[in-house]
Image (cartoon, rainbow, N blue to C red):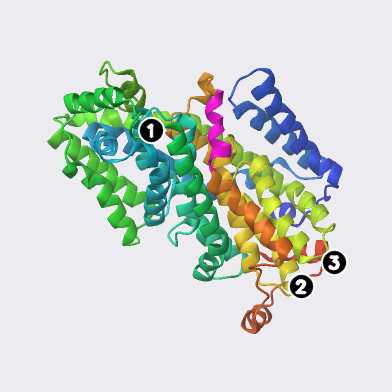
């Protein structure tokens, strides 16, 4: 039975049929988010998964085959779910240990309010570059920065925008990052050449964002008008409820050191949990059972200062379950779209309409962005366009480094800007933006995460002007020939790109 299933011929969906589950899912999301004013995208995405499965059955797929596609993508992304679990534990335990309160305390006493947003972006960039994980950075240093921003009375969405800009940009150029390694892997380039080729968009995007955050900081608040009464109330409350000391930063330092030594992220993060638990017992007098409770259910405290209580009453594995359930459903939806050929059909239809490098490069970026919007999975938004567009770049004589940059920026950087995407859901949950509780104005962090959306825009501009768009070198052409890579032109690209996908060992990741 399994053998016959594998050799079965499936009908390829036309563009209209392929778009059907995508459009209906977006309609369901729109009704849920805007008509019912309810930010819980789980059920609309689950409905989208069901519609996609029905389309697959109409095309001749057995349920078992569709199920394989769903669970394959979920399986590939389980390490990210494990990171979510570890970050949930870290948040709860590091608050209990005094690590997060210490970061907030010293941030409020040492940082200038006017430069805070710029400093927050730079700090998150450095930490994310070291850790190789944007999620770990957002859930730890980012959480502390949210507290400092609250102390300076800076709007939540501005602080979140700066945190997201730094954390995801550091992830983008870190050789330890999974997405930074995935993009060159699916396009046939090496990771360090890939990182080097991203500098022409990375550097200007970061500099522009830095200037905007500095201007915003000096415009919204300055050192003379800062509410020092509010700042003093927060720092006094922190000192009254926690032992504050530079030594309490050791759990964070341990995680960074392990990351620099290229230890895997999950063991490194769990080492941070253990170090935080030990610190909570030694420095704050917490009991073992209390530490375990904090790791599972999060930290809880009543200081009498609402700004502190709202920030520190969070964390734990259970706090991540809303996000994890959303991620799993979104991944399943993306896996069904890929397995049934719907995404492939849409991309092939788009590719047939472009006949120049400018068009192909722009399409690659927009395809990754669209996959993020529809499938909710940053990995799929990198892997699928990367496999399908690569033969076209080779046929046009351009280096696939252009492609790896396009999908990295449309995939990694746009992920946190889509609320129902795995990245966006995590940001909303870890930073406590409270979108599901009705604080929809905090979604303004999306346009304020300047570095994330400006990079793909600059990349598209370069493609139109022919700047920083390397042609394939002789060495690269020889490598294509030696590895028998598929090479296509825009005229026969549908068949060649499909052949490349079928030959790829990663059928859906």
Q: Nearer the viewer, residue 451 or 263?
A: 451
Tag 1 secondary structure: helix
Q: Which mark is residue 492?
A: 3
- Residue at point 23%, 44% (across, down): 249
Q: Of callouts 2 and 1, which one flags the residue occurring earlier in the amino acid sequence?
A: 1
Q: Mark 3, residues whose alpha carbon is within 10 Å: few (<14), some, or many (≥20)?
A: few
Q: Position of residue 239 (x, y in %)?
A: 18, 28
Q: Does residue 228 sit above or below 358 in this rendering? A: above
- Label 1 neighbour load within 10 Å: few <14, some 14-19, many 20+: many
Q: Which residue is mark 1?
A: 149
Q: Residue at x 30, y 23 (%)?
A: 230
Q: Residues within 10 Å of mark 2 (few under 14, many from 20)?
A: some
Sequence-first tag of 3 and 1: 1
Q: Nearer the viewer, residue 292 or 313?
A: 313
Q: Which residues are magenta?
A: 440-449
**What residue is drawn where x is 45% and y is 53%?**
170
- CA gap, disc 3 to disc 1? 54 Å
Distance from label 2 to label 1 (Cα)?
50 Å
Of circles 3 and 1, which is in front? 1
Q: Is residue 446 left or right of residue 56?
A: left
SS majority, magenta: helix
Q: At which x and y percent is residue 85?
A: 40, 39
The kind of secondary structure element at disc 2 is: helix
The residue to which callout 2 is attached is 395
Residue 393 numbered mark, or none: none
User: Toward the viewer: 153 or 178?
Assistant: 153
x, y (%) of residue 293?
Answer: 28, 28
Q: Residue at x 49, y 29 (%)?
A: 322
Q: Quadrant of residue 201?
A: bottom right
Q: Please, which residue is most extreme toward the front here?
A: 224
Decide whether residue 86 is among the magenta residues. no
């Amino acid at each position: 039975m399994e053998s016959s299933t594998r050799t079965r011929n499936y009908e390829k969906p036309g563009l209209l049929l392929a778009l059907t589950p995508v459009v209906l899912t977006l309609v369901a999301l729109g009704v849920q988010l805007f008509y019912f004013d309810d930010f819980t995208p789980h059920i609309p995405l689950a409905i989208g998964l069901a519609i996609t499965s029905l389309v697959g059955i109409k095309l001749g797929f057995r349920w078992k085959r569709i199920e394989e596609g769903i669970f394959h993508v979920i399986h590939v992304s389980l390490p990210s779910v494990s990171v979510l679990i570890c970050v949930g534990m870290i948040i709860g335990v590091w608050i209990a240990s005094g690590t997060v309160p210490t970061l907030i305390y010293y941030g409020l006493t040492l940082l200038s309010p006017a430069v805070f947003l710029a400093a927050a972006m730079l700090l998150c960039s450095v930490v994310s570059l070291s850790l190789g994980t944007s999620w770990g950075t957002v859930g730890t240093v980012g959480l502390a920065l949210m507290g400092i921003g609250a102390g300076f009375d800076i709007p939540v969405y501005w602080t979140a925008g700066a945190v997201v800009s730094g954390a995801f940009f550091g992830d983008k150029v870190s050789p330890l990052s999974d997405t930074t390694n995935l993009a060159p892997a699916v396009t046939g380039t090496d990771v360090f050449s890939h990182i080097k080729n991203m500098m022409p968009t990375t550097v200007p995007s970061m500099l522009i964002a830095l200037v905007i955050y500095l201007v915003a900081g000096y415009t919204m608040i300055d050192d003379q008008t800062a509410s020092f009464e509010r700042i003093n109330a927060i720092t006094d409350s922190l000192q009254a409820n926690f032992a504050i000391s530079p030594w309490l930063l050791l759990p964070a330092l341990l995680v960074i050191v392990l990351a620099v030594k290229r230890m895997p992220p999950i063991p490194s993060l769990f080492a941070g949990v253990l170090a935080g638990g030990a610190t909570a017992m030694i420095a704050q007098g917490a009991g073992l059972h209390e530490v375990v409770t904090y790791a599972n259910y999060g930290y809880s405290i009543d200081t009498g200062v609402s700004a502190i209580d709202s920030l520190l009453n969070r964390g734990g594995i259970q706090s991540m379950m809303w996000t994890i359930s959303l991620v799993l459903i979104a991944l399943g939806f993306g896996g069904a779209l890929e397995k049934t050929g719907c995404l492939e059909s849409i991309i092939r239809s788009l590719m047939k309409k472009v006949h120049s490098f400018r068009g192909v490069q722009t399409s690659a970026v927009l395809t990754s962005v669209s996959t993020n919007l529809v499938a909710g999975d940053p990995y799929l938004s990198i892997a699928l366009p990367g496999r399908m567009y690569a033969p076209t770049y080779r046929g046009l004589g351009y280096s696939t480094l252009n492609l790896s940059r396009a999908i990295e920026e449309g995939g990694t950087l746009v992920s946190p800007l889509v609320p129902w995407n795995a990245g966006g859901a995590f940001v909303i949950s870890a930073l406590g933006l409270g979108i599901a509780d009705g604080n929809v104005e905090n979604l303004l962090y999306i346009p304020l995460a300047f570095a994330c959306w400006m990079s793909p825009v600059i990349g598209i501009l370069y493609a139109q002007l022919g700047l920083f768009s390397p042609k394939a070198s002789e060495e690269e052409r020889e490598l294509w020939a030696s590895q028998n890579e598929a090479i296509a032109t825009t005229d026969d690209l549908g068949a060649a790109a499909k052949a490349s996908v079928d030959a790829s060992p990663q059928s859906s990741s």
